[in-house]
Amino acid sequence: MDFDLVIRNGVIVTASEVLPPGLDIGCRDGKIVCIGAGLPSSASTQVIDAEGAYITPGGVDSHVHLAQANAPTGDGWETGTRSAIAGGTTTIIAFASQQKSDASLFPVLEEYNKTSRDQSYCDYSYHFILTNPTKEILRDELPVMAHEHGITSVKLYMTYEIMKLNDREVLDILFACKALGMTTMIHAESHDMISLIIEGLERNKHTEPYYHAIARPRIAEDEASYRAISLAEFADAPMLIVHMSSEVALAHVRDAQTRLLPIHAETCPQYLFLLSERLKADPHDHFAGAKHVCSPPLRHDPKDLEGLWRNVANGTVTTFSSDHAATKYFAEGGKRLGLVDGIPRFSKIPNGLPGVETRVPLLFSQTPACVPPEKARLSLPRFVQLTATNPAKLYGLGGRKGSIAPGYDADFIIWHPSDKGICTIQQKNLHHDIDYTPYEGMEIGNWPRYTILRGQVVWDQAKGIIGTMKCGQWLKRGRGEVLVGKTGNLPRGMLEDERKYWL
Ligand code: URP
Ligand code: ZN
Ligand code: ZN
Ligand code: ZN
């Protein structure tokens, strides 16, 4: 067997185990062919020595906003995906967003294809954001999206005036998606609680960035999450609640999972590492908190972080995504969005933080590869599940992405123990087109030495980016897998046969 690429002697980590050292990975034509000891190489084989290194699957970031209207000065495909590979991510799922005025999804897809075609350093797909789910779209268009285009997931919003759906619309989508094997993602925050608070804050002229965190209290997420779970239970459909920041909301998820409902949870680095104090003015810049405005907001208490870490470790959280939805702090001409005639208006600050590049290294920093075992927040296999295997399976890329096994795409991260045992996150080293990182100065244990996409080294810590915008391929996805619980449940309190009267 002639391999194009052999990676020698690394410690391979999968979603279930850390394999013993001394194994080689043999790859050909962009795929993993076999794993074994002492694999042969020839003159045409590229050999990478990974002695002493960990090898984990290339990251799958299933929540990335690129070239979207809601982040007007944010990353486009070139800069966002370049940033992804430099941080170990080889696959992203971005969003194609329907506007309320769009009566069909096809022109929207065409438009997004134009922005991404030949512009991606990593493999990619989209989720559809549905804001106007007409009968025609659900009946005629979603099946074409799923079967012909391999777009097998949608994201819905329960908040934001221009995006939000009512419960009936969410139900109609859940029933449609269930029939197609599509995964429904939902942004769960109570719009009515939030809009009531914002009205009061504005009346009292509390409009600095910090009030963004006051405007979206945890109870707004807790209530909407429980409501979303109930809607999914009613429709007997799988659901993933995105960017969860509240331990109470996660307890609702855990309770649903215990009842075998297919309810999945996503969280993001910002909710594990940052607190709402970041939204306060700094001594030199009263508007600096604007850099940390995201929704749900950063929470107040270190106990909130601890609660989330527990849910990362105990299996409740299914996927760990960046929610990269970045906006430049200083836009063109030094303009700062949300500073209106010199007055801060938190409700006008675009929501979302940069993070596609720092996501994987931040989580890796909390594994036994970087900290003493008793300080580790999660195991290495759990790290692999959250950053790669679970999102790949949930979104219909199972068997191809997110694992190290024969037949899978040869996507890897190679982590050599860092010389200094320390690596500091600095904006000047990142590859996005954003002018700050919320993690500036944070010391983490390691950074990917190589990122490999379908057998090709695309990031080399010594040389920088060596992939090109032609490297990324469009991924036609299959049906999503249910990772927890099962479908076929009867909602609590319903009789076995009563649905026949209305279903
Ligand atoms: O603050 C955030 N998360 N903005 C991005 C849009 C979204 O809700 O995911
Ligand atoms: Zn959201
Ligand atoms: Zn005030
Ligand atoms: Zn988002």
Image (spheres, helix red, strand yellow):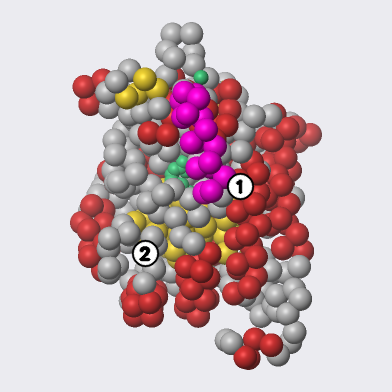
**Residue 192 coordinates in the image, percent (x, y):** 53, 48
Q: Looking at the image, tell me whether mark 1 or mark 2 is earlier in sequence order.
A: 2
Q: Residues within 10 Å of mark 1 (few under 14, many from 20)?
A: many
Give x and y (percent) for residue 220: 61, 45
Ligand 1 sits in which quadrant? top left
Q: Is residue 277 magenta?
A: no
Pick the residue in front: 47 or 141: 141
Residue indicated by mark 2: 132
Classify the position of the C terminus by image quarter. bottom right
* CB of mark 1 near ligand 2 (< 8 Å): no
Where are the magenta residues, as a range? 191-207
Magenta part, dominant SS: helix
Q: Circle 2 — which element?
A: loop
Packing grade of label 2 (10 A; few <14, some 14-19, many >=20) is: many
The correct choice, above or below, for 460 with respect to 383 in the image is: above
Q: Is residue 399 visible?
A: no
Q: Is residue 383 left or right of residue 152?
A: right
The residue sitting at 47% across, 68% down in the picture is 169
- Quadrant of the image containing the N terminus: bottom left
Quadrant position of residue 232: bottom right
- 276 vs 62, left or right, is right
